[in-house]
Image: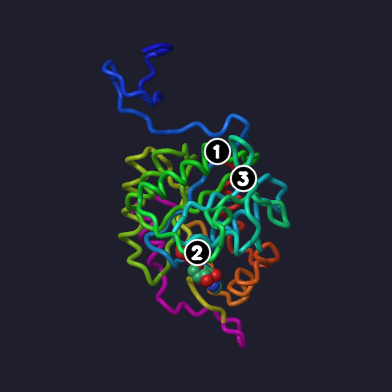
């Protein structure tokens, strides 16, 4: 090979003298600055992966970091809505610029590229994989933290993202209604195979707070996520309540006004790594 430095594991070329598995990791755009990349994963849709991603972005931004969200949940993109972004992304000849929220969070999502944000995305896995890859290779990010709202589950599309984007770690989101043990187990196996560290587990919709007496009501049972995390030597980083105020903020595009501090401990961990 021309310019061969014999470092096969970091090379994407498929050549006969290969001695280590091929790396599918792509380079980000040459003009982009991305210091750390964290993926947020879940076992299935609807457990609050986008909610956790959005809140972490808000908390890190409030600490003064430059933060971006890559909405890789292409068939259920909800990040632009949460941040009140309804405009289209602007492109140059060879790059895309992320949209920027009122609070300064950089965002790229299929919804800011579609002609009509309400159009359904009915593409198959490989096309979706290509789009997510472009969110990495073609977008001029300028961030300390890039949070990737991963496609739900541990199937094809997530695997693609794991293979193409050099993640510094992943956060596993569970909910107590889930088969938590299995979700964590699958995420752990996938992360091990891809050699990406798991930062920890965040349990969403853990409890509701009684508006009259303030008591925490663990509607779906208590302790499942903690147990599952412990089994794999992972920290349970936070438990987030079901909070109707949060749903309202997301629906109104005002997540940046949130008062919820349930994920401060997770922001601490990310900021200290
Ligand atoms: P996912 O990304 O896992 O598909 P979302 O983050 O989009 O899930 O959450 C699904 C729905 O539940 C959204 O309408 C969201 O606003 C709401 N939601 C998620 N977490 C909470 C919470 N802790 N309290 C109230 N509503 C929530």
Where does residue 102 sit, x and y in percent of width and height? 73, 57
Q: In the rendered image, which residue does mark 3 sit on?
A: 271
Tell which tag, 1 or 3, sits nearer the viewer: 1
Q: Secondary structure at mark 3?
A: helix
Which of 211 and 107 lies nearest the eye of the viewer? 107
Q: In the rendered image, which residue does mark 2 sit on?
A: 119
Judge left or right: residue 233 versus residue 101: left
Q: In the rendered image, which residue does mark 1 sit on?
A: 138
**Looking at the magenta stretch, what is its main secondary structure?**
loop
Q: Residue at x 40, y 70 (%)?
A: 176
Residue 264, magenta (yes or no): no
Question: Label 2 vs label 1: CA separation?
Answer: 23 Å
102 up-or-down from 163: above or below: below
Q: Where the C terminus falls, by quadrant?
A: top right
Where does residue 15 sit, x and y in percent of width and height? 30, 19
Judge left or right: residue 181 versus residue 120: left
Where does residue 162 sit, x and y in percent of width and height? 40, 43
Which span of residues is magenta-colored?
A: 210-235
Q: Secondary structure at mark 1?
A: loop
Which of 191 and 269 lies nearest the eye of the viewer? 191
Q: Residue at x 51, y 60 (%)?
A: 77
Q: Is mark 3 within 8 Å of ligand 1?
A: no
Pointer 2 or 1: first along the chain: 2
Judge left or right: residue 108 versus residue 231: right
């Amino acid at each position: 090979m021309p310019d061969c430095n014999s470092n096969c594991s970091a090379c994407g070329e498929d050549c006969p003298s290969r001695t280590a598995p091929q790396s599918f990791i792509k380079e980000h755009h040459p003009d982009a600055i991305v210091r750390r990349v964290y993926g947020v994963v879940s076992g299935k849709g609807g457990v609050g992966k986008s909610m956790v991603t959005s809140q972490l972005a808000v908390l890190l931004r409030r600490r003064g970091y430059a933060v971006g969200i890559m909405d890789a949940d292409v068939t259920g993109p909800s990040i632009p809505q949460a941040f009140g972004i309804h405009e289209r992304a602007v492109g140059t000849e060879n790059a895309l610029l992320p949209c920027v929220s009122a609070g300064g969070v950089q965002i790229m999502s299929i919804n800011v590229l579609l002609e009509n944000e309400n159009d359904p995305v009915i593409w198959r896995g490989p096309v979706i994989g290509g789009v997510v890859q472009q969110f990495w290779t073609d977008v001029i990010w300028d961030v300390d933290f890039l949070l990737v709202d991963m496609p739900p589950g541990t199937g094809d599309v997530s695997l693609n993202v794991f293979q193409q984007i050099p993640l510094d770690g992943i956060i596993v989101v569970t909910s107590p209604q889930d088969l938590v043990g299995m979700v964590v187990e699958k995420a752990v196996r996938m992360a091990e195979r891809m050699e990406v560290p798991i930062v920890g587990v965040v349990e969403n919709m853990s409890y509701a707070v009684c508006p009259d007496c303030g008591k925490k009501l663990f509607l779906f049972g208590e302790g499942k996520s903690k147990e599952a995390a412990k089994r794999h030597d992972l920290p349970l980083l936070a438990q987030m309540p079901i909070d109707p105020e949060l749903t309202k903020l997301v629906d109104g595009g005002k997540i940046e006004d949130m008062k919820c501090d349930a994920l401060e401990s997770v922001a601490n961990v990310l900021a200290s790594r």
